[in-house]
């Protein structure tokens, strides 16, 4: 699925319905954000949608892969997810974990923490592409799941909104880097701030652009 196809894709409940048909009544979509950021945590969300609710897909028609939405659209979708009665949990792994154990480990830790924080244990977990070996629950791995599966798309939005808010708070702690704007990603403005201010305690020193400056 190319980028243009992803833009045209509307997440559906197809995979949730398939899981229901196999006897899994409690279904959690899971996704993470912050993988490519040069600073700050990886954040994951787990979302259990109220699949019994009539018209759920219509109620959440604004929910898409978070990367396809503007900040205002993401916020609207975020509030709609909670208003619909979804069960939501967020988990994270700090930049220290990324540096110490690697990005893949940090991603999996954040997702496991999000799943563990749900108030109800899911019968199955829907994941965007990669399996989660540390989780002993049944799993369904869906290629481009954040663009195709409504539960995963909802998780991507919750994780993105939560992480953006975290980075805005970090902006006040480490002023001058512009974290509230670029959220830690490698923009021209971020590069310019690094050239002027050097590496902050929030940066991932294992990432090559940061490692070069830190050394």
Image: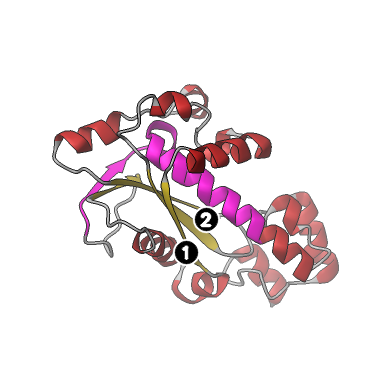
- How is this picture coloured? secondary structure
Relative to residue 138, is residue 191 drawn left or right?
right
Give the prevailing secondary structure in the magenta stretch: helix
Q: Residue at x 52, y 43 (%)?
A: 157
Quarter of the C terminus within the rendering = bottom right
| Vertical order, 175 against 24 (above or below) | below
Question: 89 and 143: which one is in front?
Answer: 89
Image quadrant in which the N terminus is located: top left
Q: Residue at x 58, y 54 (%)?
A: 162
Instruction: Answer left or right for 21 relative to 33.
Output: left
The range drawn in magenta is: 137-166
- Residue 35 image label: 2
Crowd around label 2: few <14 · some 14–19 · many ≥20 (10 Å): some
From where the camera sits, is residue 145 visible? no
Q: Please, is residue 62 above or below residue 144 in the view?
A: above
Considering only vertical position in the picture, is 195 above or below 24?
A: below
> Which residue is tagged 1?
103
Q: CA distance from mark 2 to mark 1?
A: 7 Å
User: Can you give x and y, in whole percent of width and height, for residue 73 in the image?
Assistant: 63, 34
Quarter where residue 142 is shown: top left
> Are the residues flagged by discs 2 and 1 in contact, CB closer than 8 Å?
yes
Q: Quadrant of residue 70?
A: top right
Residue at coordinates 44% horizontally, 63% vertically from top-left? Answer: 110
Give the image quarter of residue 149.
top left
């Amino acid at each position: 699925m190319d980028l243009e196809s992803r833009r045209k894709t509307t997440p559906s409940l197809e995979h949730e319905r398939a899981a229901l048909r196999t006897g899994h009544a409690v279904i959690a979509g899971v996704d993470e954000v912050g993988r490519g950021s040069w600073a700050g945590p990886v954040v994951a969300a787990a979302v259990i949608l109220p699949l019994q609710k009539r018209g759920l897909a219509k109620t959440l028609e604004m929910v898409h892969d978070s990367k396809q939405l503007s900040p205002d659209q993401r916020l609207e979708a975020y509030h709609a997810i909670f208003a619909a009665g979804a069960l939501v949990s967020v988990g994270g792994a700090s930049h220290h974990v990324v540096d110490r154990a690697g990005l893949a480990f940090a991603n999996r830790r954040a997702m496991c923490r999000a799943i563990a924080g749900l108030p109800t244990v899911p019968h199955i977990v829907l994941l965007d592409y990669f399996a989660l070996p540390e989780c002993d629950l049944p799993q369904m791995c869906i290629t481009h799941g954040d663009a195709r599966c409504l539960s995963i798309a909802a998780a991507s939005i919750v994780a993105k909104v939560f992480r953006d808010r975290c980075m805005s708070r970090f902006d006040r702690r480490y002023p001058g880097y512009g974290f509230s704007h670029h959220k830690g990603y490698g923009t021209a403005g971020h590069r310019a701030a690094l050239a002027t201010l050097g590496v902050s305690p929030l940066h991932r020193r294992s990432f090559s652009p940061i490692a070069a400056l830190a050394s």
